[in-house]
Amino acid sequence: MIEPVQKDEKLVNDFHAAETAPGAIHVWWLGQSGFLVKWNGQSILIDPYLSNSYTRPSEGTEFPIKRASERVVDPLALTSIETVVCSSAQPDRLDPETLLPLTAANPNLKLVVPAGIEEQARNLLGKASPNIVPVNAGTFVTVDSFEFHGIDAATPKIRRDVHSNSKDLGFVILFGPFALYHSGQTIWHTHLVKAIRRWPINLSFMPINGDEKAANGRDSLNGFEAAALARAIGSSLVVPAHYDMFDQGNVTTDEFSSCCERLSQRYRLLKLGQRMTMGPVTDPSSGRGIESEPYREEKGLGY
């Protein structure tokens, strides 16, 4: 079982202690595709999965799915969160056992989701649901100081509901001088690079566990594609995701790392619970940023 470098109270304390200077952002990897982002005293969560809801149904079966890593933090302990973003209705992204405690701890929480799963999210979360904010590919919503731009995600096809609303999205998130790209779960598709290159991306988060042998077809980038996509969109820094959560379908970061190095693409491998601080932006006109120093475990800090 993989242990986080900091978890529970230690992670929460680090989150609250992180400086709120407007020229820098703080990022924590919470496992799978989940990231906690703090900027200028405001915080958002992207695709948090902080429960055992995905593995529980297979317990006692012939081939149970097991966690490969410990949970980083109890969602009920995460306060001062303004917005959560869920990129799809996959159970490790739209997870009631994560979202309902988060809502209880943050009564004014807003939940940004693809418009095509809005009704599903409301039904899943019930009366205790946070305020849901739907968005489609090619459009954006503004929540507090953050703009969330919907980018088509293909799993392996681009899915829409009967009203042509998006069911799977990646997001370009704009705030202050920064532009972040979180791909959600996607493969590389025809319009992906063009849709993202409208913005100078400082930091991107991409899955690396795409499996050609998947029963329903590959629905995620592999390590090579994640590195190549980061390079193609001009991302200043890329962080891999969607690995080390479950014992099935897991991969190492070797392919991703070696491809980044061959392509001269800057990257960072985060440990579970680790904080990375990025900034300040060196050239606001280009949006390029500076990567922080490595995590220093003895101080529990990521700068």
Image: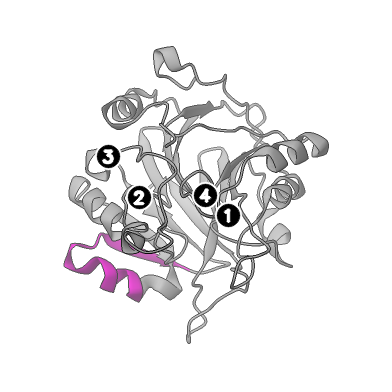
**Disc 2 element:** strand
Q: Which residue is mark 3?
A: 78
The colour scheme used to paint the residues is one colour
Whether residues under marks 3 and 2 lie with C-beta atoms below 8 angstroms apart, the answer is no
Q: Secondary structure at mark 1?
A: loop
Q: Camera-side residue: 55 or 84? A: 55
Residue 286 in percent (x, y) is at: 69, 37
Q: Is residue 1 magenta?
A: no
Counting residues from the N terminus, which is met first, the one under dot 2 or under dot 1?
A: 2
Q: Secondary structure at mark 4?
A: strand
Q: Which mark is residue 71?
A: none
Nearer the observer, disc 1 or disc 4?
1
* Residue interval drawn in magenta: 119-135
Foreground pick, 55 / 60: 60
| Residue of label 4 | 173
Q: Residue at x 38, y 24 (%)?
A: 18
For label 1, the residue is 183
Choose mark 3 or mark 2, whichever is in front. Answer: 3
Identity of the residue furthest to the right in this view: 262
Alpha-carbon distance for marks 1 and 4? 11 Å
Helix, strand or loop at label 3? It is loop
What's the distance in space between the residues labelled 2 and 1, CA to CA?
Answer: 18 Å
Residue carrying label 2? 83
Which residue type carries mark 2?
A: Thr
State the quadrant of the N terminus: top left
The earlier-in-sequence mark between 1 and 4 is: 4
Query: Disc 1 marks which amino acid?
Result: Ser
Between residues 17 and 210, which one lies in front from this camera angle? Answer: 210
Disc 4 crowd, CA 10 A, few/some/many (<14, 14-19, 20+): many
> Which amino acid, mark 3?
Leu
